[in-house]
Amino acid sequence: MKPAATTRTMLLLWAAVAIVALVAARLLSVQDTLRQALEWMRALGPWGPVLFVAAYVLATVLLVPGSVLTLGAGAVYGVGYGCLIVSLASTLGATAAFLVGRHFARDAVARRIAGNPRIAALDQAVADEGWKIVVLTRLSPAFPFTLLNYAFGLTRVSLREYVLASWLGMMPGTVLYVYLGSLADAAGSQRQRSPMEWAFYAIGLLATLAVTIVITRLARRALAQKIGD
């Protein structure tokens, strides 16, 4: 596949994932249910974010995608606080799955990833580049987040490098999904938004999406050089 075509495919993938997540939340009434749960968590005061983080970590360990939870955090907590909570939760979840894969379920994880050539190529790449590969794979949508957590447990990357690199690499996607969640909340709000407010929302979304796409594109190019297409 030509680089230009690959880039277009990647851009479409990011857009499709975001749109599908929002539409699915609407059609399946997940948004209302999740919002009620998150509102209940917020009503708990300081214990609300703690419960959210615990739920996120459990979902990650059980291989449940956290995109809906991330969107919900944006809807309830807003962009700033939502990013902080989700960033902590996703990093702890990734770390928990990493430790399970490394110490408790090595054989099961090895069997699960045996048929995935992208993930199978990680071990040697990590041995050569270390934490850089962790950052790049976190930035690339070609690698599934939940399975990747376990796969890194089988590699030679240290826990400290893995945690820091995962936190950094997941940040752009976290910001994008939390921002999308905040837009969903704004659309469903009882208060009427002014055209100027919607303009700021649109500009913010486009800027966030553009930065995420650029970073993802750079990550994919770097990965292609290090572990192959």
Image (tube, helix red, strand yellow):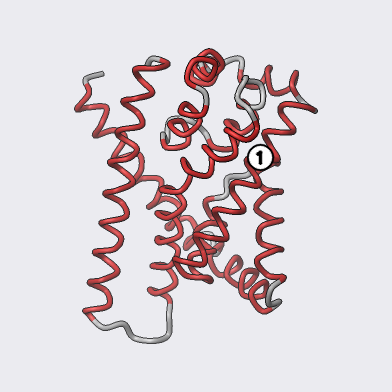
User: Which corner quadrant holds the C terminus?
Assistant: top left
Q: Nearer the viewer, residue 59 or 151?
A: 151
Instruction: Please provide percent x and percent y for residue 199.
Output: 22, 72
Residue at 57% x, 33% y is 161
Q: Nearer the viewer, residue 107 or 135?
A: 135
Question: Is 131 left or right of 146, judged from the image as shown?
Answer: left
Residue at 49% x, 15% y is 128
- Residue at disc 1, secondary structure: helix
User: Which corner quadrant holds the N terminus?
Assistant: top left
Question: Is 66 left or right of 43, judged from the image as shown?
Answer: left
Circle 1 Cα neighbour tier, 10 Å, few/some/many (<14 / 14–19 / ≥20): many
Q: Is residue 16 above or below residue 131?
A: below
Question: Is 7 left or right of 92, judged from the image as shown?
Answer: left
Counting labels gives: 1
Occupied quadrant, residue 218: top left
Q: Label 1 belongs to which residue?
A: 95
Instruction: Please provide percent x and percent y for residue 77.
Output: 52, 70
Which three-letter amino acid code belongs to the residue tagged 1?
Answer: Thr
Residue at 57% x, 49% y is 66
Instruction: Check the image and name the residue furthest to the bottom.
Output: 191
Instruction: Please provide percent x and percent y for residue 25.
Output: 50, 59
